[in-house]
Amino acid sequence: MTRAETKERNRRALLDAAFQVVSRDGYRAKLDEIAERAGLTTGAVYSLFGSKGGLVAALVTDHLRPHYEEIERAMPAEMDLLEAVEAFARYYRRSSDAPDALSALSLQITLLDMALHDSELGSQLATSVRAQESRLIALFTGRSHNGNIVTSHQAQRLVTALRALFVGLTQGVLLGLAEGADEQYFADTACALASSATLLDQDADAAVKLARPGPDGVVE
């Protein structure tokens, strides 16, 4: 096995061990236990990730990456905005039925708890999540909607709102608090949100205000 292969094997072992320990213990997770589960030393954690925070941030990226890759495949470029939003919503709802859905929810709650107890770690986690969300923003940017093209700024506002919507709905589904929230419900709710002028037409609204005539009939 080459040096690069050994490094990747150790990295994978630490991420898998971290998922188990962090999901169970949250901010109380111990590096020595994570390293022991991976068959390595704590020195390997610092060598590969720099710190406990670096390991946890990498865990978030590792957890989210396959989901974003599947979302990209579900939203081909030829879809307009609402078609893409619907495909995104349906994917998100199906993920609630996945075998690891409860484990994923547990990890989300645990990571939030960790961020609240450690501001530095919270900053690292936010950076990791934002890096992944930038992929979503790029996916929505440039799509057609009501005869216009979605800007990056509009896509960012939409992604923020959709993430909040889906996280809340998914938690409701998994906890039995969102009866009737099937794929169609997710899709209808997300498309209604995406059609909101407050999300998608802000730039246009600002332009209209700038060009609106004043009381004397002169364009301001």
Image: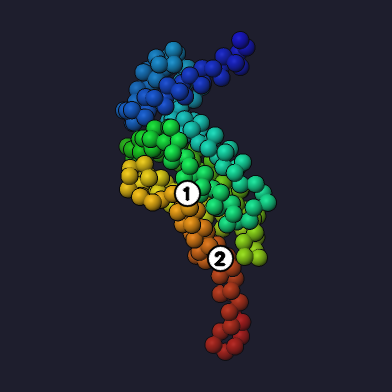
Residue 142 visible: yes
Between 203 and 201, the one lying in front of the other is 201
In this view, which residue lies farthest toward the bottom?
A: 216
Q: CA distance from mark 1 to mark 2?
A: 27 Å
The residue sitting at 56% across, 84% down in the picture is: 214
Rendered-image quadrant of the N terminus: top right
Q: Residues within 10 Å of mark 2 (few under 14, many from 20)?
A: some
Depicted 92 relative to depicted 5: above or below: below
The residue sitting at 48% across, 42% down in the picture is: 94
Q: Can you give x and y, in whole percent of width and height, for residue 59 in the image?
A: 47, 30
Left or right of 216 in this view: 118: left
In this view, which residue lies farthest toward the top?
A: 1
Depicted 11 relative to depicted 70: above or below: above
In this view, which residue lies farthest toward the right?
A: 78
Between 78 and 51, the one lying in front of the other is 78
Q: Can you give x and y, in whole percent of width and height, for residue 89 in the image?
A: 51, 49
Q: Can you give x and y, in whole percent of width and height, for residue 62 in the image?
A: 51, 31
Q: Look at label 2 and name its amino acid.
A: Asp
Residue behind mark 1: 183
Q: How is the protein colored in the picture?
A: rainbow
Q: Look at label 1 and name its amino acid.
A: Glu
Depicted 40 relative to depicted 130: above or below: above
Residue behind mark 2: 201
Between 123 and 81, the one lying in front of the other is 81
